[in-house]
Image: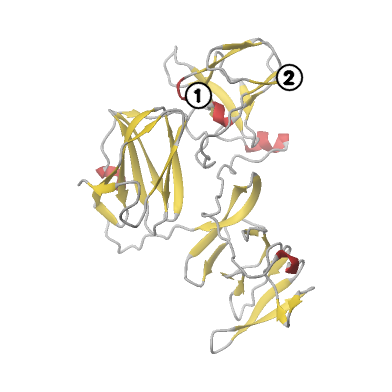
Amino acid sequence: MNTRRHARTTERVAGVVLGLCCLLSYPCDGEEAGAGRPATRDDWLTIEKQDQEFTITIGEGEVIYVQREGMVAKDRNGNLWRSRRVNSASDAKIAFFLVADQAPEAAASGVASREVRRTAYPEDRYRWETKWKSAYAANGITVKDTKVLEDGRREQGLSGSVPIVRNQIVLDAPGSRNVTVEVDPAVKETWYAGLFFNEPCVLQILEDFTLLADKEGLRVRDKHNNHWITQKVLVDDQQVIAFLPEQPQQPASSPTVPNESPTALLPPFTERLEGGREVRVRNPNAFVVYAGIRKDNAGVNFEVSANGAKSAFVPDGKYEIYFVYSSKPDALFKGDDFTLAGHGVEIKIVKVVGGNYGIRQVK
């Protein structure tokens, strides 16, 4: 039996499997889903078969509570969750938390490993914008730069069935697949789909121009010297290996705040915020942003990489939010206050003045 429940009150279930389903109000960045927070209805849990009758309570922030520890559930991505108390108190409520190391269990059940939690949105991942249509997609070709000419152009060695349109060779139309990139030791890199590769790999281009690879940890650069790295992510709910921006390493000579963490300027707090409402911060800039959400004496800090996004999950309520930029580590910025009531929010750190969300320096 797979039953959907939407009531906020306590429900008694005598059946075998319970599916807790709720339409997401805001998209969730899988990288944060379940990390250190209790599961909510937005996680779409299915509780494994139970020998005894059990009770489910939907509490504040849509958090799912049960009366027994050690119960096991799965979300729709196959990740495992287990029930435990939310703190060390003997009378603390029992909620579901993501299993910290579930690779063996996941492998045994044929589901995706926990490492695939992040959803790569179109603006985050590398996409090769080309004029060619999918009708000219290549399949099973091999490319390798064999010589760099004086004007910077490259001679390429090609093999396989290569599409030719109006006397022009087409290598990288959307829909191309099984494209093998080889690297000549004398040239040291091969150009394909707008990127320079220095190690062999096999590539695929999706219909939306997203470039996929056959292995993780592949580091490449584009013609603007932006650096990208391949990671396992979810694209349209499918596990793939895509190219995401690689955060540049801070030069050893760069100024830093002596003996201080970048979050030292953020207001202190004594209680950690945890809940079911997503606060996403999107950072389209070349610097790292350190964000801090505050409500009275409670708070949570998190780091947003350059050209990336990160989320924290908090209960409904009214909040303040603060920022420290790695490009200006001695300054504290404050955003407009916001209120969560049954939904999440996304905040974008914009470079221009006059947007609909205000950020000002307060220290």
CA distance for labels 2 and 1:
23 Å
Residue drawn at the location 53% of the way across and 27% of the way down: 39
Q: Is residue 302 left or right of residue 126?
A: left
Mark 2: few, some, or many residues within 10 Å (few <14, many ≥20)? few
What numbered label is drawn on residue 321?
none
- Which residue bears the numbered disc 1? 62
Which is more N-terminal, label 1 or label 2?
A: 2
> In the image, residue 132 lies at what x, y percent?
67, 70
Q: Nearer the viewer, residue 62 or 310?
A: 62
Residue 338, placed above or below residue 358: above
Residue 260 visible in the displayed image? no
Residue drawn at the location 42% of the way across and 55% of the way down: 284
Mark 1: which amino acid?
Glu
Q: Is residue 332 left or right of residue 66?
A: left
> In the image, residue 219 lies at what x, y percent?
55, 63
Residue drawn at the location 64% of the way across and 34% of the way down: 76
Q: Residue furthest left?
A: 363
Report which quarter residue 55 is drawn in: top right
> In the image, residue 250 lies at what x, y percent?
37, 60
Q: Is residue 314 left or right of residue 262?
A: right
> In the image, residue 222 lies at what x, y percent?
52, 69
Total tally of numbered discs in the picture: 2
Mark 2: which amino acid?
Met
Q: Helix, strand, or loop for circle 2?
A: loop
Q: Quadrant of the N terminus?
A: top right
What numbered label is drawn on residue 1?
2
Q: Helix, strand, or loop for circle 1?
A: helix
Q: Nearer the viewer, residue 88 or 309?
A: 309
Report which quarter residue 326 is drawn in: bottom left
Residue 119, placed above or below residue 138: above
Q: Is residue 191 left or right of residue 223?
A: right
Q: Nearer the viewer, residue 231 or 208?
A: 208
